Image: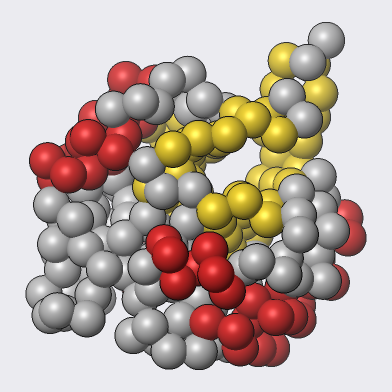
Amino acid sequence: MTANLKILCFSDLHRNQDSARQLVRMADDVDFVVGAGDFANRHEGLADTLDILAAIDRPAVLVPGNGETVDELAAAAASWKSARVLHGNGCEIDGVSFWGVGGGIPVTPFGDWSYDFDEDQAAEMLGGCGKVDILVVHSPPLGIVDHDSAGKVRGSASILDCVQRNQPKLVVCGHIHSSWTRRETVGPSTVLNAGPGGITMQIDVES
């Protein structure tokens, strides 16, 4: 039996409370919520949006961005009872499988404050990912929804390899602001650079 699911996807809130309130309203009409990182600005202000998002009762999967660590995100999301924080691991919720890896990949030019990983570290964190329904990553796959404002590609080769190898139905990312709301396909996988406005995607899952 095939179930058609609605997934509310977002990224890069960067403390934007108005966007967080909009996402709470949008979540009433979906089955799952996915947040692809950067809730904070340089490790500051996580509670600004997470305290608002905690009103969402739909199952939610979050990964850290490069602006917050996984430990910081997990602590700030403790009051969001329906949320799971992933980073180098996966979970299954109501028959839907997820894998998550956050942070800036590859290492960004932003300096020591940025929560970054090189391609070898990312490949290790993605190594346990199998045939999942939804891959949640802060950074985009290399060459896919990853063009910065100067037109340079900023995505990750290890994430692209994971997508090609495992063919998730949906890949949700963010990080590259100039590519917000863009979506492309890699084989059968749809890759969405979500952005803070919230985009609802639909996928079919065998139940």
- Judge by depth and name the residue closer to the eye, 150 or 6: 6
Q: Residue 43: which quarter of the image?
A: bottom left
Q: Residue 169: which quarter of the image?
A: top right
**Residue 155 spot, x, y in % from top left:** 23, 53
- Quick one: which residue is furthest to the right in this view? 28
Vertical position of residue 7 compared to residue 55: above or below: above
Q: Residue 64: which quarter of the image?
A: bottom left
Residue pictured at 33% horizontal, 51% vertical: 140
**Residue 184 spot, x, y in % from top left:** 42, 43
- Quick one: which residue is furthest to the top in this view? 1
Vertical position of residue 1 compared to residue 109: above or below: above
Q: Quadrant of the C terminus?
A: top right
Would residue 202 be found to the left or right of residue 181 on screen? right
Q: How is the image coloured?
A: secondary structure
Please state the total of marks drawn on the protein image.
0
Residue pictured at 15% horizontal, 68% vertical: 108
Would residue 132 be found to the left or right of residue 117 on screen? right
**Residue 1 spot, x, y in % from top left:** 83, 10
**Residue 105 spot, x, y in % from top left:** 22, 55
Residue pictured at 41% horizontal, 48% vertical: 87
Residue pictured at 12% horizontal, 41% vertical: 120
